[in-house]
Amino acid sequence: MPRVTTKGQVTIPKEIRDALGIEPGDELAFEKTDSGYMIQKEEPTTAEGDNPFEKYRGSAETDETMPERMRRLRGEYPRDVDDETDEDANSEVDV
């Protein structure tokens, strides 16, 4: 059974951390219930309490494939990649 340290810290057993998906740096919530307290992992939030990823929801909606999108984001777009097959790209050249 874990014990509380003088700093008010307690080690959460590994099986419970695994079951809740708790990792170092995660924030936890304690909710009072009739029989004690319930612990749960909190979703990421900003200082204002908002989900930091909400503003990006749906921003990837596009007809581009992932490789096309990544090439465009890297500034490599447009680029014709159909001319070279994987086999051609990996072949060695004798000098």
Image (cartoon, rainbow, N blue to C red):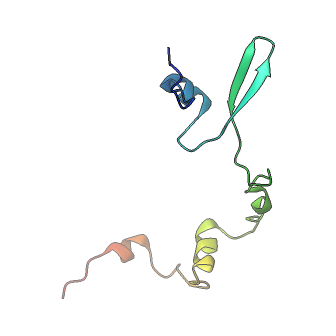
Horizontally, residue 51 falls left or right of residue 72, namely right
Report the front residue among 88 and 9.
9
Say above or below: 67 vs 42. Answer: below
Outermost residue on the top side: it is 35
Count how many numbered circles sit on residues in the image: 0
Residue 35 in the image: x percent, y percent? 76, 11
Horizontally, residue 87 falls left or right of residue 2, namely left
Outermost residue on the front side: it is 6
Residue 46 in the image: x percent, y percent? 74, 54
Report the front residue among 35 and 83.
35
Outermost residue on the bottom side: it is 95
Report the front residue among 53 and 29.
29
The quarter in which the C terminus is drawn is: bottom left
Residue in the image at 57% along x and 79% along y: 74
Residue in the image at 26% along x and 77% along y: 92
State the image quarter where residue 40 is shown. top right
Say above or below: 5 vs 82. Answer: above
Residue in the image at 73% along x and 15% along y: 36
Residue in the image at 72% along x and 20% along y: 37
Outermost residue on the left side: it is 95
State the image quarter where residue 66 is shown. bottom right
Report the front residue among 57 and 68.
57
Residue 55 in the image: x percent, y percent? 79, 61
Say above or below: 39 vs 95. Answer: above
